[in-house]
Image: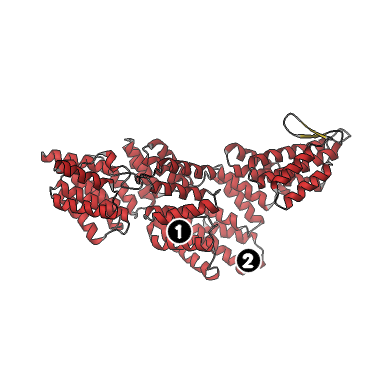
């Protein structure tokens, strides 16, 4: 009966009937000639070695079926029991001593161990990763396979042991030079393309090295290594070479989108590339969190909603899907439709699914920042930078540290961002943000903002900050000129940025007591977005009091969530306007 039930379980598993396979395997383990120990492990009754092996096979089938039905933890328990049972079969022979396993038995035990390690790695928590590593290390070196080497290196990377991961991936390439996953992982871990190509050449045979696919592999390695090293020119040339041979490959297209998106070089082209990838293969998730972040930053809310909905429907177990969902929920803030708690839940789930996703951590840190949970934001942004350094993470760190009153830490982060990208407009504007907090450093702040605008004249946050600083210094006319010039020469296409400029210029005009002009710009903001809180409150206050001071100096609750995506800047502008009005004796 046991053997018949086990055969039925195996057949059900082959046909994909996982629930039936679990039930037949349980029947095989529950026959009269088997019982269970206190820990749930099957124990053969008066069957000896063959009974143990039968139990082990039934447990293995049960583990396969549980994993197939997405009960990974249940599968882990079954695989553990199967390994324990097979160990008893080897140690419980009738002679009393431990039996020597045959080649076939060793292969079966190693296969179960690999299944267990794979399931533990998919769980991904620290305890599971340690156990997975111990299971893999129990396999003799000479019997380790390609999957074994890749999984060991992947676990080391998940644990943050980057040196061990680099060593593991290099060992994989020595034996299997066409393991493209290892080559790309080395690029992501910061290994230079020349070193990876040398390793590939050393491992490949002369015949392999002369093949066309080996040349494609070298170009592939060069492209991804250059991307990680921010060598845009080299990456662009390598990707262009690959696209001639593989015009429809989604991985190469995703690399091209990343090149276009680098430092907002060509955001529209990058978004079109991502959209084309989705059209060809809607199940492709790599880089889609970057795509969602670009849609969010550029104000394409409907496209972001469509992307997040489709990804949650097709790929609900992907970290990228929940990152896009968190960004979509963030767009609902201020619209009366909730969003904050849903955004938190989605971002935290994305990080739980993939703790090494720097985009998920960046989005989570941004949500913490907007919720005024500054210490949590600092922790998330630091974790993001530990995985992959990002100017957006430095942006968040500067904002969080300034909100916490830690100017020294904010300056340290701003300088690190500037050192990493000395010709980046955002890095210069972060230096300006920190200098602007010290009255003695206003001139340094102005120079930093002007340098930021020299590199990117369309950086709205630098324009707003420069205008706010001039208001604080009593130069309202200069602030007005800066904002007016921006609208005339570099009018933003993004609705959010345009509304921000309209409201900031209207505020400056109100401070100058040019109320008719101020009302005109607030009205323009409301024409674009009727629910714009800043414009609504300012006009209401002016209608009620006819006092420009009260209309210009908005309260914190009036402007919450309506400015910078990373954090509102208008709290400071409120303080600036009040200070200036006091100086004028208004």
Label 1 SS: helix
Question: Residue lying farthest bottom?
Answer: 244
Counting from the top left corner in percent of width and height, residue 235 is at 47, 62
- Place residue 414 in its image quadrant: top left
Q: Which residue is at 71% across, 39% downward?
A: 78
Q: Is residue 104 above or below residue 578?
A: below
According to the picture, the residue beneath numbered tag 1 turns out to be: 258
Question: In the shown orientation, is residue 175 left or right of residue 162?
Answer: right
Label 1 near label 2: C-beta < 8 Å? Answer: no
Number of the label disc, if any, that sits on residue 214 = none
Counting from the top left corner in percent of width and height, residue 120 is at 63, 42
Instruction: Give the camera-side residue of 467 and 285.
Output: 285
Question: In the shown orientation, is residue 53 left or right of residue 468?
Answer: right
Counting from the top left corner in percent of width and height, residue 339 is at 41, 44
Determine if residue 556 is in view.
yes
Counting from the top left corner in percent of width and height, residue 136 is at 67, 43
According to the picture, the residue beneath numbered tag 2 turns out to be: 209
Q: Work out whether mark 2 precedes mark 1 in sequence or the reverse, and give the earlier one.
A: 2
Label 2 SS: helix
């Amino acid at each position: 009966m046991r053997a018949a039930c086990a055969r039925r379980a195996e057949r059900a598993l082959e046909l994909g009937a996982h629930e039936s396979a679990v039930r037949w395997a349980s029947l095989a383990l529950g026959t009269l000639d088997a019982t269970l120990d206190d820990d749930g492990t099957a124990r053969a009754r008066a069957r000896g070695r063959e009974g143990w092996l039968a139990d082990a096979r039934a447990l293995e089938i049960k583990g396969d079926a549980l994993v197939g039905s997405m009960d990974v933890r249940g599968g882990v328990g079954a695989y553990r029991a199967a390994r324990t049972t097979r160990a008893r079969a080897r140690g419980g022979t009738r002679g009393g001593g431990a039996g020597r396993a045959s080649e076939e038995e060793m292969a079966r035990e190693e296969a179960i161990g690999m299944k267990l390690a794979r399931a533990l790695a998919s769980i991904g928590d620290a305890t599971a990763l340690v156990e997975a590593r111990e299971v893999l290390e129990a396999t003799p070196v000479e019997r380790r396979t390609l999957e074994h080497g890749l999984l060991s290196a992947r676990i080391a990377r998940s644990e943050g042991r980057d040196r061990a991961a680099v060593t593991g991936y290099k060992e994989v390439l020595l034996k299997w030079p066409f393991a493209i996953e290892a080559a790309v992982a080395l690029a992501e871990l910061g290994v230079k393309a020349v070193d990876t190509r040398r390793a590939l050449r050393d491992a490949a045979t002369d015949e392999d090295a002369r093949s066309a696919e080996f040349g494609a592999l070298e170009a592939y390695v060069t492209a991804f290594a250059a991307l990680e090293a921010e060598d845009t020119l080299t990456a662009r040339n390598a990707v262009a070479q690959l696209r001639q041979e593989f015009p429809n490959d989604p991985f190469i297209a995703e690399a091209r989108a990343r090149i276009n998106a680098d430092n907002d070089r060509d955001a529209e082209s990058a978004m079109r590339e991502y959209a084309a990838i989705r059209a060809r293969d809607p199940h492709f998730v790599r880089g889609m969190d970057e795509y969602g972040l670009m849609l969010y930053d550029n104000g394409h809310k409907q496209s972001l909603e469509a992307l997040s909905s489709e990804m949650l429907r097709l790929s609900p177990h992907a970290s990228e899907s929940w990152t896009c969902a968190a960004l979509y929920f963030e767009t609902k803030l201020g619209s009366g439709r909730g969003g904050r708690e849903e955004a938190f839940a989605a971002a935290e789930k994305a990080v739980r699914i993939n703790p090494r996703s720097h985009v998920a951590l960046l989005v989570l840190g941004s949500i913490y920042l907007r919720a005024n949970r500054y210490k949590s934001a600092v922790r998330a942004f630091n974790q993001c930078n530990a995985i992959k350094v990002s100017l957006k993470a430095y942006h968040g760190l500067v904002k969080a540290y300034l909100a916490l009153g830690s100017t020294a830490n904010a300056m340290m982060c701003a300088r690190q961002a500037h050192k990493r990208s000395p010709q980046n407009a955002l890095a210069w504007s972060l230096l300006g943000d920190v200098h602007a907090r010290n009255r003695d450093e206003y001139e340094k702040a102005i120079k930093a903002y002007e340098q930021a605008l020299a590199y990117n004249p369309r950086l709205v946050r630098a324009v707003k900050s420069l205008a706010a600083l001039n208001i604080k210094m009593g130069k309202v006319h200069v602030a007005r000129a800066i904002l007016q010039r921006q609208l005339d020469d570099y009018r933003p296409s993004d609705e959010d940025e345009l509304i921000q400029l309209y409201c900031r210029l209207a505020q400056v005009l109100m401070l100058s007591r040019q109320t008719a002009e101020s009302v005109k710009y607030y009205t323009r903001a409301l024409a674009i977005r009727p629910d714009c809180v800043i414009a609504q409150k300012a006009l209401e206050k002016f209608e009620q009091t006819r006092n420009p001071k009260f209309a210009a100096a908005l309260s914190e609750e009036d402007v919450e969530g309506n400015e910078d995506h990373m954090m509102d800047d208008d709290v400071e502008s409120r303080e600036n306007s009040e200070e200036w009005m006091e100086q004028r004796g208004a």
